[in-house]
Amino acid sequence: MKVTKEMTANLTAEICIEITANDYQENVSKGLKKLQKEIKMPGFRPGQVPVGMIKKMYEKSVRAEEVQKVLNDSLYNYLDTEKISILGEPLPIDNKNKGINFENTDDYKFYFEIGLQPEFAVDLKSIKPTYYTIEPTDDMLNKFVEDIRHRLGKFENPEEVGATDVVFGEMLVLNTNDDAENAKIKTSFAVDKIADENIKTELIGKKTGENITFNVRNAFTNAVDRASMLRMDNEKADNVQDVQFTISSISRVEVAELNVEFFEKAYPKQDITTEKAFRERAKKDLCDTYAKEADRYFLNDVTRLLIKEINIELPDEFLKRWLSFSAKNEDDRVKIIEDYEKYRDSIKWQMIEREIVKAHNIDITEDEIKNYYKTSLLINYFPVMEGETDEDKKQREASMEKIATNLLENKEQTKQVFDYLYEIKLTQVLKNNITAKQKSINIDDFTKMVMEERESK
């Protein structure tokens, strides 16, 4: 076997692979002997079919299979040994590979065209993107503060229903189009979520043990919320009309006062003593919730700028042929040529990204994926309970470890986690190594900017 390379242009080359009978004949003989043992044919005992008959029937296909194996191994071993970095995959040169006959020929020559990766340097300091810190609107901040006050407020069980209370009880389905009629459902809902003001007014002032009859579709217009409250699937919930709700208990939250005690509960050991300082800290929390969107926009912007800034010459005609070769039909081939600039940018970014990954040793380990499962997903199902003993902790962590290990076996889900963690690491590397302009922007303006850019593309 002999492999040679001849440059055909700056970034393309032709590979010639010469294969002789010595490269494959031994495996052909083994393959035919194996077939002789396995094939059953009328008139012959198992394993006794004459070798000549086996050769006549199967030698051509076995030879073709073994030559293909040698061809693939030799091609990719050569590229690996010679450290040749290629774009796409080697393409067979049809006009030079015509006339190959696996029936009578012993020696073969196969020709491939390859596209070569160009040399280039990635200078992250050459671009000046903008990193947007997304800030909430005043209304969002006010709502967030109120949510914290409710969460840390004092719970009460009043005698009468108020406008902001949550009521618990049993709901009796009075009429429906299916077997849910007369069903009794233990449920709860917030009074201020009721859409119909008449129903809401009738409920306010009711006491524990009293009931109210109303049209559930008018009270809760959101189909998903209604189904959740009725503990039914959406289709069955859509059929429910009138219900009778009997109150078993009432829950009310007296919102926490904006004082030092509340500030300490909300943000322990932060030394927050004024409402202004508290709102600033709450604002930071809200900004952090938008950080993923800001990072994603930053990564997209950096990608675009690096593709534009770094001069990378590509073997365009070869890439068009390679992309067309992989197309399923003529329509796909036409579309590929029409959209070649998009494919070209994608290929350039893959090359740039590969260099960044190599330069900064970006990698995601199996332990990191497992740790993500435990700290971000499973912790919600295995929370640290008050008064947890060392033995409790040991059992909880052992359970999480076992489930996380099992989750790793789900290749699709694990690939999603890998991609998520990889994007976080890549973005952080870019943030650490690029001097970006910092700019604050409220969420409404940020959303408008993203939508306008999307529409322009």
Image: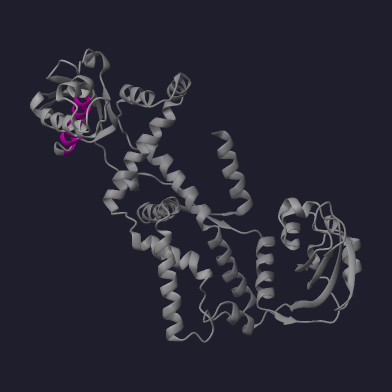
Magenta-drawn segment: 62-80
Give the left or right position of residue 87, taking residue 213 as reference: left
Q: Is residue 6 visible?
A: yes
The x and y percentages for residue 380 are 53, 69
Please give the name of the residue rendered at 32% of the width and 34% of the height, measured from the top-left corner.
311
- Was residue 4 drawn as part of the magenta stretch in this picture? no
Against 151, is 325 above or below? above
Q: Is residue 13 visible?
A: no
Q: What type of secondary structure mainly makes up the magenta span?
A: helix
Please give the name of the residue rendered at 22% of the width and 23% of the height, measured from the top-left corner.
58
Give the left or right position of residue 75, taking residue 279 as reference: left
Asked whether 294 or 426 is in front, the reply is 426
Against 453, is 237 above or below? below
Asked whether 27 or 15 is in front, the reply is 27
Q: Which colour assignment does the render follow?
A: one colour
The x and y percentages for residue 281 are 57, 71
Q: Quadrant of the C terminus?
A: top right
- Was residue 64 drawn as part of the magenta stretch in this picture? yes
Asked whether 289 or 419 is in front, the reply is 419
The x and y percentages for residue 239 are 81, 52
Against 366, is 84 above or below? above
